[in-house]
Structure formats: C-alpha cells, structure tokens
Image: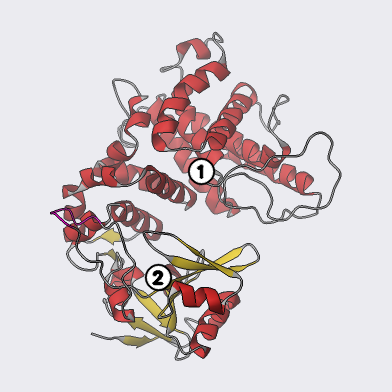
C-alpha cells in the first residue's frame, strides 16, 4: 500500500532541511533518478525535533552516485552506500534495497545486504515503522508504506514485519529499539517487546565494533541513563558487556531502583544521569575517552578498591589492570582507553575541590575540555551535586576557548579524539601533535 501523506501547512518547512541534503536530492532527481530524504531526519522533523543528520535514499546505485558527486566515496561491504562530503559534513546516500535473500540453514542473520529494489521494497526492509518514512522534496509529502506516521502520532516503537524475525536478522535492532524508546519517550509495542526478550542472546552474534558503536550512540544521545537501565532490565546489557559487569564483584551491578546510595552501582547510575544533563545542557557529543572514563570511574569505589581509597597503591598501574581486559574484549581503541585513564587519574585527587582545575591535570591541550567535563561529571556522580557539574562544565568551556585561540569554540569532531574540526594557525612548542584513530 502506498501512502502519501501531506504534511499540515507550516509544520515541515524546507528551511528546516539541511541545504546540502536538498542539493543531493535535487541533483539525483535532475539526473533522472528517484530520490528522497529518508529515515531519522523525516521522523525528527515530523516530531518537531532537530535532526542530528540527514540521509538520502535513491534508485541510483553507489557507483552512479560516485560518478555524479565528485565529493563522494563508496563505503561498506555488508551494506554498500555513498558518503557525499560537504566540508566536515556527510550526507549518507543509500540505494533502495529489497529484503536480502535468506541464508543457508535456519539462522536468518543478515550477512549481505546489497540487493537493489524499489522505494517500497526499501521501506519494508527497514527496522521500525517510524524509520521507514520518505520525504518527497518536490511534492512536499511524506511517503509512508508502513503506517509509520500512525505510530509516530501514537508514540509507539514497532518493527516492520514479524518482530522476532526482524531481531534475529539483525540483533543490533534490539539496542536501537531501546535507543528510540528512551530518546523519544515512546513505548515499545507489546509484541515487539516480547519478541525482543525472547531473542536477547542473539545479540552475541554481532561484531564487537557494531556493539561498541551502538553503546557510544546511546550515551551521546542525552538519554543514556534510561537506555542503559532498559538494556539492564531486558538482559541485553549482560550479553553486550559481560566482562565489564563482572568487575562489579559478586554482588553484581544493581538496578537503578535497587542500588544503595553509597555503592559502585549508584555511582554509575548517577554518572550516567550527569552525562545526560551535560549533553542536554551543552549540545556537546562526549568523546569515546570521556565515555570510557565515566564507565570505569565507579570501579575505583572504596568498596571495590579499598587500597586506592586509603591512599595505598599506584593508581596508574591499577587502572591498567582494571581497564585493559574488558576494553580489549569490547574492542575499545587503545587511544580511547589511554585517554580515559588520563581523565580518571587527573580528576580523582582534586575533583572535589570546588570550582578549581586540578593542578596536575596532565592531559594534552586538545583533550583538556573533555578532561574537565569528565571531572565535573565525576563530581556529580560521587556527590550528586548538580551545581558542581555546572562549575566544571564552565571551566571546560573556558579551556576550549583558550585552546582554540578564538573568541568562540569551533566545532568538534566526532571521532573521539577531541580535536577541533578547524584549527587556528598558531605556533606550538615541542613535537608535532599526533592525531588519534577513529572510533
């Protein structure tokens, strides 16, 4: 069934759409291809939320897209698509796909997803109805084959098609269901939720890199505490981060509502809530190193590390022992782990000093902002003092401005290295700064 729903006048103006995304769509249309805005940007614009990024779906193949746009490149093997670059911005442009052919055997796990199809095929192979919407730029209409608009109006997360099969095809969809439910404050449709609970163990079939990337996305979205709690109650967290959870000892990680105040579990939940407040207040995207520092900070709690709490033992050596095995198991980049250890070592002794920067904050200047932001989050996690978080965030913003050499802070990259997207020309002493690897 094809449904083209006209948006009420004034509720979906094109001036809210990224102009570069419009350029991509219109150039594809001019070349004789079908092209639409698709997925999350359509969902968010309909809900009057600001999209994080804009994606395009088209009938053109990746090779054709590459020929049309000199500022593009083809990426992916399992899911081949094109990235069209406008400076640091990327407009992800994918080809309409149909449902992949079933694999041999009883396991429906998708390992190859490059079967081209029509726009309706593409809608029906997507994960949730709220993400299966297309926007026709020329006619200013939402194209809805999956009743996604109804679910947006009702505030419901529902799979497209039979839910257990969709989760078994790609188990990462379980984490995405949690992300959308918590970030949008939607309810997961009962049949979808029941299916998710039945197939939770399948999440172990996913690659470490995909799982880690989804965890980073959860914790960057401003609803990390609710997302992690929902994963914990569903049993997903126990399969995604087993080595990490084992570090909480025999008692294990307690649920948010059951965690006693002065425990590692309570510190973790307060830290996640503080991170959410930080993201919502600043609009910043916490780096991988900051996120890892937040996750491991509760494991330095006196209940788990009494010698460190009493001032005995080397913090750096103990951090290496605590963090390395689970980080290797999770696939955390070594650079991110090292930055997390720097933030933890720098913040712990002096973080309780109200409004003061630690005198020995031994981190590279590009990472000073994140180190200060973590220090504020850590104070809030250990004392539940929101005022302290605000002070440390202010210190971090000052550090960013000083590092940039400008009146205002430039845009920051998302690759977790904390470096600025554009750098002023300035003389530096010492050796050349190394740039960290991607997530």
- Whether residue 217 is visible here, answered yes or no, is yes
Residue 26, x across and y down, in percent: 53, 85
The image quadrant that residue 388 belongs to is top right
Give the left or right position of residue 352, taking residue 32 as reference: right
Give the left or right position of residue 174, taking residue 401 as reference: left
The image quadrant that residue 348 belongs to is top right
SS for tag 2? loop
Q: Which residue is mark 2?
A: 39
Q: Determine contact: label 2, label 1, CB under 8 Å.
A: no
Residue lying at 65% horizontally and 37% vertically, measured from the top left:
372
Rendered image: mark on residue 275? 1
Tally the marks.
2
Rendered image: mark on residue 257? none
What secondary structure prevails in the magenta region?
loop
Above or below, 10 relative to 228: below
Residue 242, x across and y down, in percent: 32, 32
Residue 50, x across and y down, in percent: 51, 67
The image quadrant that residue 245 belongs to is top left
The tag earlier along the polypeptide, 2 or 1, is 2
- Label 2 to label 1: alpha-carbon separation: 27 Å
The verdict on residue 107 being magenta is: yes
SS for tag 1? helix
Which of these two is toward me, 132 or 11? Answer: 132
From which residue to which does the magenta span run? Answer: 104-109
């Amino acid at each position: 069934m094809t449904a083209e729903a006209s948006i009420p006048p004034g509720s979906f103006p094109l001036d809210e759409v990224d102009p570069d995304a419009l350029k991509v769509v219109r150039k594809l249309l001019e070349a004789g291809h079908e092209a639409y805005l698709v997925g999350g940007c359509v969902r968010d614009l309909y809900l009057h939320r600001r999209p994080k990024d804009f994606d395009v779906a088209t009938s053109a193949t990746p090779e054709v897209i590459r020929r049309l746009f000199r500022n593009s490149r083809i990426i992916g093997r399992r899911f081949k698509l094109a990235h069209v670059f406008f400076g640091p911005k990327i407009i992800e442009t994918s080809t309409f796909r149909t449902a992949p052919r079933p694999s041999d055997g009883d396991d429906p796990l998708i390992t190859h997803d490059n079967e081209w199809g029509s726009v309706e095929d593409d809608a029906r192979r997507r994960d949730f109805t709220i993400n299966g919407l297309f926007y026709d730029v020329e006619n200013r209409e939402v194209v809805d084959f999956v009743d996604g608009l109804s679910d947006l109006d009702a505030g419901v997360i529902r799979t497209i098609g039979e839910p257990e099969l969709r989760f078994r095809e790609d188990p990462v969809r379980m984490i995405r269901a949690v992300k959308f439910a918590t970030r949008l404050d939607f309810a997961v449709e009962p049949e979808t939720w029941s299916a998710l609970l039945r197939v939770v163990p399948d999440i172990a079939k996913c690659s470490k890199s995909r799982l880690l990337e989804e965890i980073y996305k959860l914790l960057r979205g401003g609803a990390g505490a609710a997302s992690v709690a929902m994963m914990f109650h569903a049993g997903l967290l126990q399969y995604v981060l087993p080595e990490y959870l084992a570090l909480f000892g025999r008692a294990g990680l307690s649920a948010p509502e059951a965690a006693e105040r002065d425990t590692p579990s309570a510190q973790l939940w307060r830290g996640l809530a503080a991170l959410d407040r930080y993201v919502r207040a600043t609009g910043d995207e916490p780096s991988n190193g900051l996120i890892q520092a937040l996750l491991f900070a509760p494991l330095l709690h006196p209940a788990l590390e009494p010698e460190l709490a009493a001032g005995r033992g080397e913090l750096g050596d103990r951090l290496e022992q605590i963090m390395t095995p689970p980080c290797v198991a999770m696939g955390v980049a070594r650079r991110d782990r090292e930055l997390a250890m720097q933030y933890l070592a720098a913040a712990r002794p002096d973080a309780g000093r109200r409004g003061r920067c630690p005198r020995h904050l031994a981190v590279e200047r590009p990472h000073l902002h994140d180190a200060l932001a973590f220090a504020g989050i850590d104070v809030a996690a250990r004392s539940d003092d929101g005022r302290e978080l605000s002070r440390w965030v202010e210190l971090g913003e000052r550090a960013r401005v000083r590092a940039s050499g400008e009146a205002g802070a430039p845009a920051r990259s998302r690759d977790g290295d904390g470096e600025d997207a554009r750098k002023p020309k300035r003389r530096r002493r010492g050796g050349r700064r190394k740039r960290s690897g991607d997530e």
